Image (cartoon, grey):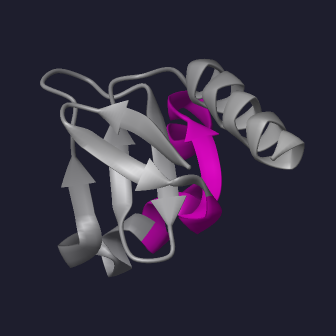
Amino acid sequence: MYIHVGEDVMVRTDEIIAIIDRDTVQFSEEIQHFLKTKDKNLCNLAKGSYKSLVITTGKLYLSPLASSTLKKRSKKYSNYENLL
């Protein structure tokens, strides 16, 4: 299944490694260093300030959607997949 992470971008749920809220990203030196090393794989989907960071197997997305919203969407799809 796919999850909408912002703009017109859909990401496969099985490719998502982590969804991290903006406050954690801003206050974690480790995450800041990680983002600097992965700069070429970073895609900013937020037109203004981002609300969450979505880490996938291939890319990093700065999403305009809140981490709680993305988490709910991913759980919804994973529960649906378990029913099939």
Q: Is residue 61 above or below residue 45?
A: below
**Left or right: 15 as drawn, with respect to 59:** right
Identify the residue at horizontal 33%, vertical 24% (top origin): 64
**Left or right: 72 as drawn, with respect to 57:** right
Q: Is residue 26 above or below residue 12?
A: above
Residue 63: give x, y in percent of width and height.
Answer: 36, 35
Residue 75: give x, y in percent of width and height.
Answer: 76, 33
Q: Is residue 16 magenta?
A: yes
Q: Is residue 79 above or below residue 14?
A: above
Q: Identify which residue, 72 or 25, lies in the foreground.
A: 72
> What predominant SS class does the magenta segment belong to?
helix
Query: How many numbered marks have been drawn onto this rendered protein structure?
Result: 0
Q: Identify which residue, 82 or 53, lies in the foreground.
A: 82
**Left or right: 79 as drawn, with respect to 35:** right
Q: Identify which residue, 29 or 74, lies in the foreground.
A: 74
Q: Identify which residue, 67 or 72, lies in the foreground.
A: 72
**In the picture, residue 69 is in which quadrant?**
top right
**Left or right: 78 as drawn, with respect to 6:** right
What residue span does the magenta drawing correspond to? 14-34
Q: Is residue 20 magenta?
A: yes
Residue 62: give x, y in percent of width and height.
Answer: 34, 43
Residue occupying the far left of the picture: 47
Identify the residue at horizontal 26%, vertical 43% (top origin): 9
Identify the residue at horizontal 40%, vertical 76% (top origin): 58
Residue 40: give x, y in percent of width and height.
Answer: 19, 76
